[in-house]
Amino acid sequence: MDRKEFAINLRVARVRKRLTQTALGKLVGCNQVQISGYENIDSGVTPSKGRIESLAKALDVEVVELTGDMEEEELLELTTSNS
């Protein structure tokens, strides 16, 4: 998975759930600006592994639906390199 794929998958899952960025942020303990950053392909903002798990739970999807076919090692690398 690349950053672009995650951003698109997150936005699609949020819209399908009919949540605003603000509402999703409240569910996972962050604000609208952070959610916007995660969904913005050019922002370079990537949530932590724990936040990705929280986002998946709030959106009623599996983590892999947000991250694509990313392996555990790749996910860890992505989330630690952009912290």
Image (tube, grey):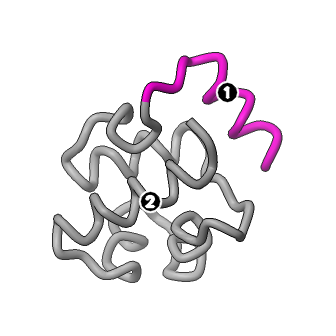
Depth order, front residue of 57/38: 38
The disc at residue 68 is: none
Which residue is located at x 51 percent, y 59 percent? 7
Assign a secondary structure to mark 2: helix
Above or below, 64 against 52 in this view is above
Left or right for 49, reference 65: right
Q: Earlier in the sequence, mark 1 or mark 2?
A: 2
- In terms of image quadrants, where is residue 12? bottom left
The amino acid on which the numbered mark 2 sits, given as a three-letter code, is Ile
Identified at 29% across, 66% down, the residue is 14
Q: Give the quadrant of residue 69.
A: top left
Residue 22 vertical position relative to residue 17 in the rendered view, above or below: below
| Above or below for 30 versus 72 | below
Tell me residue 27's x, y (percent). Answer: 33, 65
Q: Residues within 10 Å of mark 2 (few under 14, many from 20)?
A: some
At which x and y percent is residue 21?
Answer: 39, 79
Q: Give the percent coordinates (x, y) of residue 68.
A: 43, 34
Residue placed under numbered mark 1 in the picture: 76
Residue 82 located within the stretch drawn in magenta:
yes
Residue plotted at (24% across, 75% down): 19
Query: Would residue 13 be counted in the magenta stretch?
Result: no
Three-letter code, disc 1: Leu
Cβ–Cβ under 8 Å for marks 1 and 2 = no
Q: Tell me if residue 23 comes above or below residue 50 in the rendering.
A: below
Residue 8: image tag = 2
Q: Quarter holding the N terminus?
A: top right
Query: Which stretch did the figure color magenta?
Result: 69-83
